[in-house]
Amino acid sequence: MFFIVAYSLIFAEIFVRVFHPVPLMPRYVTGAPYGIRMNIPHSQYWQTTPETRVQLRINSHGIRSDREISYQKPENQCRILLLGDSYLVGYEVDIQESFAYLLEQKLKQANYACEVVNLAVSGFGTAEMLVALEQEGLKYQPDIVIMQWHSTDWDDNVRAGLYKLDKNQQLVRLATTYLPAIKISDWLNQFSVYRWLIENSHFYSAIRETVAENIKTLLVTLRQTKAKKTPETTEADNLPTVPTDKKPYPQLLSEKLLQAAQQVSQDHHAQFAVLEIPDRRSRVLFRSHLAKFDPQLQTQLSMWSPIATFTQAADPAQKLYFEKGHFHLTPLGNQLLTEYFWSELQKTGWLEKFKISH
């Protein structure tokens, strides 16, 4: 039986590698003291796809960076705080090709005394970003807070169950923690064999990703179904799918979360903006979801999308998103995102007081 099992596993690994290679995309995350996920401090690991191979290096605060960043901000220095998911972490690209790194280089070249603090974590939705802002991000004394938006946030915010809307459509905290499968992950990560598997085995990675996606879909379905079947539940359990203003529940919840993040930022004297990562439909076609938000809210929140920049630069011969990995931005995609963001940031005048004069 041992040899049969071993032979079957080896055969499966070879078969997947040859006929259907899959991305090897380990996500080394753990539970933060404030109840949500964070990148495992001091971790180093490889991500390999048919298109790229990169090493991720995480500092002692769970930030993808090759240097330590103290909570105490240097005098007369600006800090831009990034909150996002794997797009802003910079999955599938070297750190020098990531948005955070490119943005910081732009700031230096333009003679601004400013550094970028990147608190992005793979899988984050707006709800987790809000918690990260309140519990960790404010410690860095940011002057500008940038919160990423992506179409996956609609479901992520419902799935997390961290916040809900009460009967008056006000945002309230529902749960103190959201740590999906973190206990199991922490236990497995103790073993070098497991870490080797997630960084090297195509067969295991294929199974792992399939199971993870099914569980994520199931969680959203269960929460929505529970809301429909139990209209008379207690206020804490009630997750209406269609609020009284007729907006879909995920949309209204997301709007309230973004507004709350802006308010937290402003209460701590920081500017706030939302940066969208458009969906990729093809090499030349992209889709923005910002139109689903109220136009007045888009202006109020400074919601920016690089879709026009992406569309103008699109070429069938080049890729802005990887196509054989997990569809993150390529080095060119990150470069275009940085150029767009930089142009929008300069229009605001938020950086002027941090200009270094010679």
Image (spheres, rainbow, N blue to C red):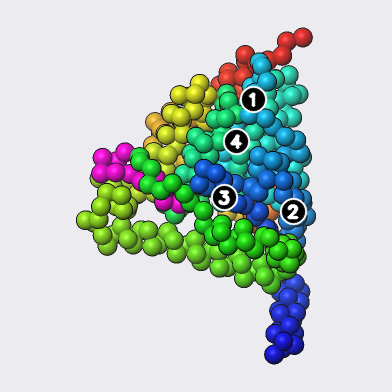
Image vertical order of residue 21 relative to residue 62, above or below: below
Magenta stretch: give its range.
160-170
- In what quadrant of the picture does the N terminus appear? bottom right
Q: Give the CA distance from mark 1 to mark 2.
A: 28 Å
Residue annotated with mark 4: 82
Q: Residues within 10 Å of mark 2 (few under 14, many from 20)?
A: some
Q: Residues within 10 Å of mark 3 (few under 14, many from 20)?
A: many
Q: Give the CA distance from mark 3 to mark 1.
A: 24 Å
- Magenta stretch: includes residue 145: no
Residue annotated with mark 3: 31
Q: Residue at x 62, y 58 (%)?
A: 186
Q: Residue at x 54, y 30 (%)?
A: 138
Residue annotated with mark 1: 72
Disc 2 marks which amino acid?
Answer: Tyr
* 228 left or right, relative to 342: left
Q: Give the CA distance from mark 3 to mark 2.
A: 18 Å
- Magenta stretch: includes residue 165: yes
Disc 3 marks which amino acid?
Answer: Gly
Mark nearest the camera among 3 and 4 is 3
Q: Give the CA distance from mark 3 to mark 4.
A: 19 Å
For marks 2 and 4, the one nearer the N-term is 2
- Mark number, residue 45: 2
Looking at the rendered structure, the secondary structure element under dot 3 is strand
For marks 3 and 2, the one nearer the N-term is 3
Kindly indicate whether the residue at mark 1 contacts the one at mark 3 (C-beta within 8 angstroms): no
* 184 left or right, relative to 90: left
Give the x, y percent position of residue 291: 44, 41
Query: Where, by quadrant of the figure, is residue 23 drawn?
Result: bottom right
Main SS class of the magenta portion in the image = loop
Disc 4 marks which amino acid?
Answer: Leu
